[in-house]
Image (cartoon, rainbow, N blue to C red):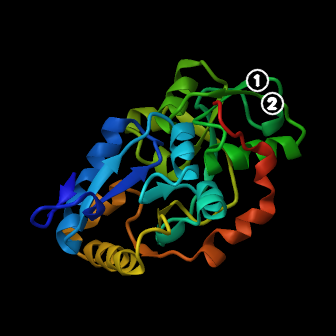
Amino acid sequence: MFGQALAAPTAAQTYSISVVPQLTPVAIHQDWTPILEKLGTATGLTFELVVESSIPAFEESILSGTPDFAFMNPYHCIIAKHHKGYIPLLRDSANMLEGILVVRKDSPINSLDELNEQSVAFPAPNAFAASLLIRAQLAKNHVNIIPNYVKTHSNVYRSVLLGDAIAGGGVNNTFEREPADVREQLRILYVTPQSAPHALGANPRITKAVRDKVITSFIQLSKDPANAALFDAIQMPKPIQADYSRDYKPLEALGLDKFAVTGGQ
């Protein structure tokens, strides 16, 4: 629990923030704890970090409207908006999101066609750029792969390194945060078109006054050079106010629902 609580706090004064588990719980806590501490101090509110056990578990939580705030991928922004009315508040303006397919640096694979009937690792079925966009492109190219869902982006990269999968789906933001010895053993085979990155969204039950306070404080904190490394760690080095119609609604036309999975994996 982070921030400064008022005297005799009530449950209504504590806001949950669920972060999509792209990385390990340890890494997410390490990255988000300092930001939520500062956000709590700046807003006078109390925030509780929630890390679900998997991306599908995270999806179930937003589809049920459980978290007050959620840091989610673009596809999650769409389904959260349609099912529970979540409102995107903030997204990064420095880096657009790109899905990537990686292979071992010494792999003979040089084209998507060569992945036909091969095992390809993904973090989860509904990971947006790391899975949905890539699988849609493979299907468009009539490449049939054997998907292997390994829960996190970190696991994807290591599955490829260990030879458990011939290739793996990730995103530019998580790949760049891997240790140098991991990145140097991998090669990017394919890059998806860019899209707006992950957003911090709010459940519509959160008042506009609180939403505005979070947006304003978040952006102000990011302008302090002392906080630069903290915002880079959560993939929002230059946060701006998000807008669903501008940033995420255009993605609805991609027809990714046919590649999404409800429940299960």
| Image spot of residue 41 (x, y percent) | 17, 68
Where on the picture, by quarter, is residue 45? bottom left
x 84%, y 35%: residue = 113
x 70%, y 46%: residue = 132
The answer to whether 80 appears left or right of 21 in the picture is right
Q: Is residue 74 visible?
A: no
Q: Which residue is labeled 2 in the image?
A: 114
x 43%, y 39%: residue = 52
Element at badge 2? helix
| Image spot of residue 230 (x, y percent) | 27, 59
**Three-letter amino acid code of the residue under disc 1:** Gln
Where on the picture, by quarter, is residue 116? top right
The nearer-to-camera label among 2 and 1 is: 1
The answer to whether 162 appears left or right of 190 in the picture is left
Element at badge 1? loop
Q: Between residues 121 and 247, which one lies in front from this camera angle?
A: 247
The answer to whether 38 appears left or right of 26 in the picture is left
Q: Badge 2: how crowded within 10 Å, few (<14), some, or many (20+)?
A: few
Q: Which residue is labeled 1 in the image?
A: 118
**Three-letter amino acid code of the residue under disc 2:** Glu
| Image spot of residue 46 (x, y percent) | 23, 61
Q: Is residue 135 visible?
A: yes
